[in-house]
Image (cartoon, rainbow, N blue to C red):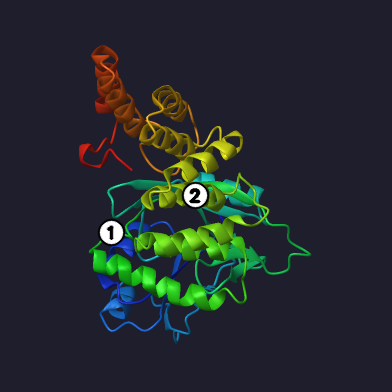
Amino acid sequence: MIPISLCIITKNEAQKLRKCLSCIKDYVPEIVVVDTGSSDDSIAVAKEFTDCVYTFEWIKDFAAARNFSISKASHDWILVLDTDEYVEQFDLETTYKLMEENPQSVGRLLRFSDGISGTVTVDRVERLFNKTYYHYERPIHEQVLPIDPQKTAYAEFNIPLKCQHDGYVGSPEDVAGKALRNLDILLESVKDYPDSYTYFQIAQSYYLLHDDENAKIYYEKGLDFDLNPESEFVQIMVVNYCYTLFHLNEKEKALTFATDLEPYFQNYGDFQFLLGYLHTSQQHIMKAILSFIKATQCSHFHTDGVTTFRAYHYLGTIYEAIGNQELANSFFQKRDNCPNVDQNHLLI
């Protein structure tokens, strides 16, 4: 068994911290908690679970705080969680085996994130690694990267750890506050990291704030690079850029942009769903039907339901509108038989 140190940074989230640590405490031999300036009971809560509690003066740099927490860990292998992430399943035996097979790679856990609009997004995030080879870089939306890229080639593997994330659930004021905090750091960091990923994250913050004009500007900056369509952030950026154009009533531009890129995203459910949505808005009925059907055949997606109940809902609605009630009912039945279907949040 390879010992793992759990490292968490936190600030003013005592209730979430207790839930987070309660869910993970039986899986790891060491828990390291670093507080970055709480005024609530976060430090007291942390001490209920571990003696390894430290403070770090906040310098608007998440990577610096992460790396400080890692420096306090006794073991080389580090598992990182956020305070608002709660472990639901963790197959330790398989994880240990994967760690032995991938000693210089980064393990990615599976995360389900609740959104403010009722959607659930699914992604893999890099959270398990050996601190001999890896550390964090970037002041916000920090990334796990090799300490010495000349000696360590970045590689990933998926681990059987599933967690729930509620970081963007709360009042609109809370969500806006987090987005504005992120923007403050991102807009400062762009001078050091003037790349597609930074522009994407700036756009995402504006997107959360429903500031479509600025979101469009920064999505376009992020898209103005030589990009890999298999990169998750690129996939999300393309889809959200099109929704931003739609919100700005630039529907034809969104459809043209998406249609030109379709060959690169044949198996991406969010993209095929988006195409169906855009075709529907332009009354391209048969093209919309084809795109929604393609969405149901995709194995890769980020938003829960785009390959199942949401696509079925739109297909049923289209067939109902053109007078084919039999087909409409069949798709509505498929929709209703899907697990986790939320009738209040069928639309994107």
Kindly report which numbered mark, 2 or 1, lies closer to the viewer in this rendering.
Answer: 2
Quadrant placement of the C terminus: top left
Label 2 crowding class (10 Å Cα cut-off): few <14, some 14-19, many 20+? some
Rounded to the nearest angstrom, the CA distance separating label 2 from label 1 is 20 Å
Which residue is under mark 2?
A: 236
Rendered location of residue 36, percent (x, y): 40, 81
Looking at the image, the residue that sits furthest to the right is 150
Q: Compare residues 269 and 132 and report the one nearer the observer.
A: 269
Identify the residue shown where x is 35% and y is 77%.
11
Q: Compare residues 239 and 69 and report the one nearer the observer.
A: 239
The reply to whether residue 279 is in sight is yes
Label 1 crowding class (10 Å Cα cut-off): few <14, some 14-19, many 20+? some
Q: Secondary structure at mark 2?
A: helix
Q: Secondary structure at mark 1?
A: loop
Quadrant placement of the N terminus: bottom right
197 displayed left or right of 321:
right
128 displayed left or right of 215:
right
Identify the residue shown where x is 59% and y is 71%.
137
Are the residues tagged 2 and 1 within 8 Å (C-beta)? no
Rendered location of residue 108, percent (x, y): 53, 52
Q: Amino acid at mark 1?
A: Val
Identify the residue shown where x is 45% and y is 61%.
215
2 displayed left or right of 118:
right
- Dot 2 or dot 1: first in sequence order is 1
Reply above or below: 112 against 283: below
Reply above or below: 324 against 177: above
Rendered location of residue 90, percent (x, y): 43, 48
Q: Compare residues 83 and 207 and report the one nearer the observer.
A: 207
Which residue is under mark 1?
A: 169
Q: Amino acid at mark 2?
A: Ile
What is the quadrant of residue 338 in the picture?
top left
Q: Which mark is residue 227?
A: none
